[in-house]
């Protein structure tokens, strides 16, 4: 069965979704049908095909496949509670990424540059120079001001958002 053939109606005949817990279960056995995979996303198998659980939750609730990506607001890829899911473009979803593991400053958008700290922000796939500062903290403060102005989807970095 192709993805486009899987409808909310067919899905609701064989599974249940609890929007409070984010868990998908079999209507027949009541067993949890989700399995966490290597990248941290929950996958479910429906009619012999593997799907991302957050996309299945979306169609289950909204009746249609998401047209874009699904963002996990708190950054936990296994947390498929309805309050943690929102549709997002690739650019919007990128506004909610965690600080990269190879980041040397400890702050998103800040990197060492010559004898200073440079702040840059990504807008529509391109980096925009925010400024050069004497400390990473000052550069990050400037990054945060820019983020509030240009990242309307997620103006506050995820580490400061609830959960």
Image (cartoon, grey):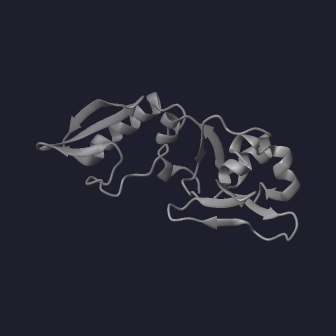
- Residue 35 point in image, percent of width and height: 64, 67
- To which quarter of the image does residue 58 belong? top right
- Residue 133 point in image, percent of width and height: 21, 39
Outermost residue, front side: 1
Residue lying at 39% horizontally and 52% vertically, measured from the top left: 99
Outermost residue, left side: 115
**Nearer to us in this view, 84 or 88:** 88
- To which quarter of the image does residue 45 belong? bottom right
Res 33 visible: yes
**Nearer to us in this view, 2 or 108:** 2
Quarter of the figure that contains the C terminus: bottom right
Q: Is residue 11 left or right of residue 115?
A: right
Residue lying at 46% horizontally and 33% vertically, measured from the top left: 148
- To which quarter of the image does residue 142 belong? top left
Residue lying at 87% horizontally and 63% vertically, measured from the top left: 27
Residue lying at 40% horizontally and 34% vertically, measured from the top left: 145
**Nearer to us in this view, 9 or 21:** 9
Q: How many marks?
A: 0
Q: Is residue 30 left or right of residue 162?
A: right
- Residue 60 point in image, percent of width and height: 79, 47
Res 78 visible: no
- Residue 64 point in image, percent of width and height: 76, 38
């Amino acid at each position: 069965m192709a993805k486009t053939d899987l409808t909310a109606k067919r899905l609701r005949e064989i599974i249940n979704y609890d929007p409070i817990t984010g868990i998908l279960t079999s209507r027949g056995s009541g067993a949890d049908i989700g399995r966490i995979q290597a990248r941290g996303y929950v996958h479910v198998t429906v009619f012999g095909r593997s799907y991302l659980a957050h996309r299945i939750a979306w169609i289950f609730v909204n009746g249609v496949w998401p047209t874009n990506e699904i963002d996990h607001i708190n950054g936990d890829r296994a947390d498929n509670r309805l309050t943690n899911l929102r549709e997002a473009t690739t650019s919007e979803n990128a506004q909610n990424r965690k600080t990269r593991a190879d980041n040397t400053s400890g702050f998103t958008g800040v990197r060492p540059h010559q004898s200073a700290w440079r702040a840059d922000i990504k807008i529509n796939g391109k980096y925009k120079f925010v400024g050069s500062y004497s400390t990473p903290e000052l550069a990050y403060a400037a990054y945060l001001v820019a983020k509030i102005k240009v990242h309307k989807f997620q103006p506050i970095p995820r580490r400061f958002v609830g959960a």
